Structures are given as structure tokens and as C-alpha cells.
Image (cartoon, rainbow, N blue to C red):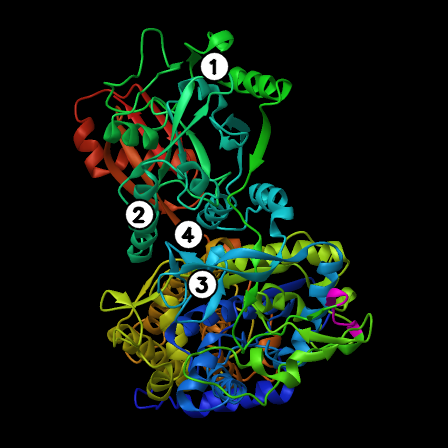
Amino acid sequence: MSIDETLSYDFLAIESKWQDEWQRQSTFKAEADPVRPKYYLLEMFPYPSGRIHMGHVRNYTIGDVIARYKRMKGFTVLHPMGWDAFGLPAENAAIKHDTHPAKWTHENIAYMKQQLKRMGFSYDWDRELATCTGEYYRWEQQFFIDLYKKGLVYRKLTTVNWCEPCQTVLANEQVIDGACWRCDHQVTPREMNGWFFKITDYADELLTELDSMDGWPEKVLSMQRHWIGKSCGAEIDFPIEGCDQKLTIFTTRPDTIFGVTFMSIAPEHPLLETLCRGHEQEAEVKAFVLDTKNAKQRANYGDVLDKAGVFTGAYCLHPFSGQRIPIYTANFVLMDYGTGAVMAVPAHDQRDYEFAVKYGLPIRPVIQATKGEEHGEHSPSAYEGPGQLIDSNEFSGMESEAAKAAIIQAAETKGLGHGKTTYRLRDWGISRQRYWGAPIPMLTCARCGIQAVPVEQLPVLLPTDVQFDKSGKSPLHTLESFTHTTCPNCGGPARRETDTMDTFVESSWYYARYTSPGYTGGMLDTQAAAYWLPVDQYIGGVEHAILHLLYSRFFTKAMRDVGYLSIDEPFTNLLTQGMVIKDGTKMSKSKGNVVDPDTLVKQYGADTVRLFSLFAAPPERDLEWSDQGVEGSYRFLTKLYRLVVSIGHVGTQTPPSTLDAPSRLLQRKTHQTIQKFSADIENNFHFNTCISAVMELMNVLTAHTGNEAKEPAQPAIVHEAIETVIKLLAPMVPHLCAELWQISGHQEALDTVAWPTFDPKAASEDEVTVVIQISGKVRSRLQVPIGTDEEALQAMALADDRVQKFLEGKPIRKVIVIKDKLINIVA
């Protein structure tokens, strides 16, 4: 069996052939099957920016391997693809290039779709969807109205996060350290009316279910727990001196209330202007508020402002002791946490401690950690742990946890406050002041007020006859043909809502629409949704841990409560893949380190690109780009191609009852490889170690089949090894493996072939190493057949030259034999 090293691996012809065949046969069409188990595999769908990048290639290759593997394991697989097609980049491109966002978007979709097809991804393209089409967002609009009727959607005047370059409002989750998540420009506060989803109604459920989501990375779970930010404590009123108003604070440590020495309120607190009015500090307070606002706008990502504050000139009274307490405004107090006001206990809060030391404010300890230990004005830090209360009136001597409950009870009895649970999570503001988004299906009538668009009038289509200007402002606000409409209640004139929905709305339910993308009877075909959902494996970047994943969880629960779904969570398992790194940084056009997948496919073939992206690193780790690694993957596939084509159909006869040594070695390696490959996919998707195992098998295979093989293996064993390599690599390099399967003489398509199973007996080693000890010290080793009996082992050990050397002149007291493992001679 000689191997022709001159054979040319024509990857372009092979890949084109099988892509055409898969399309002709509808190989990857997903269909419900009452016999086979279902498996729903989904990667986060792309924004149609114009070209796929290596991040896309890596993400989608990981998913494709799992989808193909599950098919070979006997599952009926749903593996869809679509386009997250609304958003600012399309609108900005339209303004820049004097085109329409719809034209720009659909042209990009067409190009990127061909790129994905060239990669051989096993998508059911019959389920393709684009979120910018009326066929998609009409159901989103109907769901919006459903939620509005349930009280889960509302409109209010509020202070919002405004991004000037993007000319739109951002949700709190889209503001990263004061900057826009998309353009990194510092946001500014602005008052305007906006529409909100009441995600806070689900805060407890969103939080508690994280504890049972074992298929998600702990990092993502921790990020969501932090963002939801549940805090249990109390709201307590501190009467403001000289007026009938109260300063309400929220605290998680009511046990420290007798240690309060000053109050801190946010610079945006609505009472601040009243508190400082008429005091000599008024001008200083206003200047501080302005300086704080400017400093926050100038701050870079991750910057922490130095703690600073100003006395307002006002005092409040301690609700239990009546003590007079100064009120400060401080830059570290957040208006969107609790009430925007906190009681400062510098002895037991490090932030308050640093502020008190800076401004010379009193520090009063009221919690004693251990007997004789106190934290006061001269302590190096605050004591933030629990302990026994001191100097706390009738609560002195109580332990912290008991004191918390007792103080809350006392506050409620005296009408001073109440127990309270708060969340960092805020309702999701979804109004956007841009054009390229789904219209919000609401209108305003001067006579009837806010009204929902009648369901029979949906979808409210985004008009195409618009003109853009360079400012980026939405043309919808002034387009009378769109804004002028009729009130469904009174028939009078009404004005249509001109805000569009946040594009995260579309991506919050697309996974469910894939189960019935052509369904016209409602948002979902509930029967199809019940069959396919939840998604068994979801794959995407960790950067979506809060925004997309949290919103999708909320939408799932809301769709359940409206009656569309019967599940509580959308994604059973989540894999967050690492980034693609080149020259030490993430690939990006701005850094000039982008590698074009199209160029690589033309030079090496899609299978080579797929193999490298899987082999270079485990999926959860960053992948460091290597040109040499790509070439190495290509050489390996060329070697495999030449081997199989040269050998051809080597025989399918049953292996002989007796195997010679080379055949037994190859058989054992074949079955060990199946065992390891299958385990590594099932346990952690470590495709890199899977590929390494196949490469090792290939080395053994070529050593006993190649041109210089001194001990060739028997044809049936070679055939088994070749078929195993092809089957194992089929999910990773599907084009080449489909071709080699056909070359090997098979009529059935490789996509219909079952995953190989290993034979434990064939995988087992024929020999084992038995250690020989003399009085507990290792002196020699024996290589013996597995199962050698104890008498034979003892005889071989005593006859061993090294053993005889160490036993010379010493009588043997006892020989202990542990079969297949150990012989211990006591001399």
C-alpha cells in the first residue's frame, strides 16, 4: 500500500461539490421527529456589517461541529441562522454613502450569506430570518401591545442616558462606566418621554433561577447576579431640620444606625436644591454639582473619581436619638441606587470612613467585632463585619443580625421606616430616537390619550420614503405621512409614536421565532416552540452576558406569561468562546491586524480554516492567530487526502481472529482515539485535544501503511482506522471527509452515518508494567501480559537480574503480589 505524495488536494472543487450536494438534498433541514431526541444548537446571530470576520468563523465553526456531531449521534437537530438587521451602523452608513439602510442591509446580508455557505456550515436556511422585515417585527409589535395590556410596558417622563454622536437614548445596561456601549462617547442626562419594559417585575425570578443554571459559565452567572443587585435592608426617614420634609435613606446595615455621623446624598438628588437654598454654601454646592457632572463625563473607562463632597448647610435629625446630623452631597452616591441618599457610618463603612477622615467628620463605633476590639477615629480602616452592638440605646448587646430585625421592627412600629428590598436592576428603556428600528405600535390622541395600534393594522411598517441629514436625527419625527394617523377609539386625528425600539428587543426572542419562522397565525407556533425549546446549546461572546442574555431571559418569562411559551429559561447550556487575537490584541480594522476569511478560504480551503480555528485553542480561551498554524492544518489535511486516495477501497472484511503486532497496535490506537475524542466533545468541547488524538492515530496509521512501513498492518484493520479518522473529523472538516468517504467506496452519505463506538476490549492495552519493590523501595519493573497470574509474577520477579542483585545474601521473608500492579518482596 504505497502513498502517492504527488496527489493534489483540490479543496476548491471538493468544497464546491459538497456544498452544492447538501443544498440539493436539503441535508440540514430540521424536522420534528417523534422517534429521535431533539437538539437545538444556536450561535448568536450576526449583525450584517458587510463581511464575516475570524470571530464569526470561530464562533460558527464551534457550533457547526456540535450540530454535525449530534446528528451523527442520532439527534434531530435544529441549527438555524439569521440576521440582527436593525441598528445604528446601517443608518450611519446610509448617511455617509447616500443610500438607504434597507438597501445597505440587504446587500450585506446577501454577501455574508454566501460567505457562510462557503464555510460549509450546516444551517437550515429555510428558517433564515432578518429582524428588519415586517414579517418579523409585526409579531414583536403585537407582543409589545400584549405587554402593554398586562401593565408590563409603560411610558413616562424620565431622565435618560443620551448619546450625542448616536443621537439616541441608551438603557442603563448600555452605559459602560459612563460611556456609550457602541461608540465609547460619554453620555449625558436628558429629560424626555420614553417607553419602558418592566423587567424589574421579574427581578426575583431572574435572580433565583441563576442558582439552578448549571449549564452556564459561573462568570456569566456572577455578572448577572451583580447587575440585578438584590439588597435587603430598610428605608428609614430622617426628618429635615426646620421643615416638614424627610430625607429617606436605604441601608443594608440598619444595625449600624446609631453610628451615623453625617448624611450623603447624590448630586442629582431632587431635595438638594431645597436643602442648600438660602445657605452660604449654596453657590459652592451648585459649583460642586456641575464639577461632578463634568468629571463623570470626562472620566475614562474604569476610572474611579476621588471621593469628594460639600456640606449643604442643612441638617436632619436622627429618628431614634434626635441627634442633629449634617447633610453632605457626595460624588460617590448614586441616584439610581436605593433612594439616592445614604446614612454615613464611617466606623463601619470604608467609603464613609475615607470621606470622614478627609473632611474631619466624627467616627462613632457601634459594632464590636470581638471583646475589647473597637474601631474609632484613629483606626486605620472601618470594620464592616458583624458583631455585638455597643452605644446603641436599647439595642446594645444584641448581635448584628438580630439587631437588624429589631431596629426595622422598631422603625415600623414608630412610623419611622420599613423593611425594604431593592435592586440595582432598572426597568428597560427601549425608546430610541433613530430611524432604522422597529416602530413602536402606539399613538397619542389629544382627546383619548395614549392608544395602542389595533392588532389588525399591524405591522406598523417603517416608511422607506425618508431623507437623511448629516446630523443623524431621525427623519420620522417630521414625516407627516407617517406621524399623522387616526385614533382607533374616537376616530379623530392622532400622532403616531416616532421612537423606534432598541435593537436588543429583536434579539431577545429570535431564538423562539426560529422554531416557526414562516408561521402567520401569531408570534409563535406554540406546538413547534414546545417541541424545540429550550435551546440546548447557545454559543456567543461573554460581552453579551448582561445586555442580550438578561433581556432574552426576561422575554422568555414574559412570553410564557402571555401564553406563547411553556419554558422558564431560553438556553439550557451556554458556551462563551474566546476572542481571536493577533499580534497581542483583538483583531479589528482600527488596529490593522484583521485576517480576511475569504482570502484564507481561497488559499487553503474552508476545511483548513475550520480545522485551525478548532485546533489552536480550547473554545473558551482566546485564540492566538498563527500563519504557521494555518499552514500546518493544511499540510495535515493534504496528508490525509493523499493517504486515503492512494489506498482507496482497502477492504471491509471482518478482522481476522488473530492479529499480528502492527495490526493489534493500530486497532488499539483506533479504539482509544474514538474513546478520547467522544469523551472530550461530550465533557467540555475541547476540540483541540480531539484533533490531537486523531493526529496521533494518523501517525500510527501511516507508520503501518506508508511507503516505508516495515511492518504493514492487515487491510481490514487499516480500513477500520481510515474510516474512523473520516468519521471523527467529519464534523470538523465536512467537505474533505464527505469526499474521502465516497472515495473509500461508500454509497451512503457520510451525514447519515452513525458516530463510531469504541470497543473497550480492543482499546485495552495488551501489556502492563508491574513495579517490583524490595522492602518498600522500587528496584525494577516487569512488562507482562495483562492478567498474568500471581505465581508467574512472583517467579519472574525473583528471576529478575536487578532483583537478584539487591537480594544477594538476604533471606526472603514474604512476597506480596498485587495482580497487574505490584510485587513487594520483604527481605
Q: CA distance from mark 3 to mark 2?
A: 22 Å
Q: Earlier in the sequence, mark 3 or mark 2?
A: 3
- The kind of residue on which mark 3 rests is Trp
Mark 1 surroundings within 10 Å by alpha-carbon count, few (fewer than 14), some (14 through 19), many (20 or more) = few
Q: Earlier in the sequence, mark 4 or mark 3?
A: 3
Q: Is residue 517 magenta?
A: no
- The kind of residue on which mark 2 rests is Ala
The local secondary structure at tag 3 comes to strand
Q: Position of residue 219 (x, y in %)?
A: 44, 48
Mark 3 surroundings within 10 Å by alpha-carbon count, few (fewer than 14), some (14 through 19), many (20 or more) = many
- The kind of residue on which mark 1 rests is Ser
Q: CA distance from mark 2 to mark 4?
A: 84 Å
Q: Earlier in the sequence, mark 2 or mark 4?
A: 2
The local secondary structure at tag 2 comes to helix
Q: Contact (CB < 8 A) between labels 2 and 4?
A: no
The local secondary structure at tag 1 comes to loop
Instruction: Tell me the number on the disc at residue 321.
Output: 1
The front one of 765 and 145 is 145
Among the 4 quarters of the image, the one containing residue 341: top left
- Pick the quarter of the image with the C terminus: top left
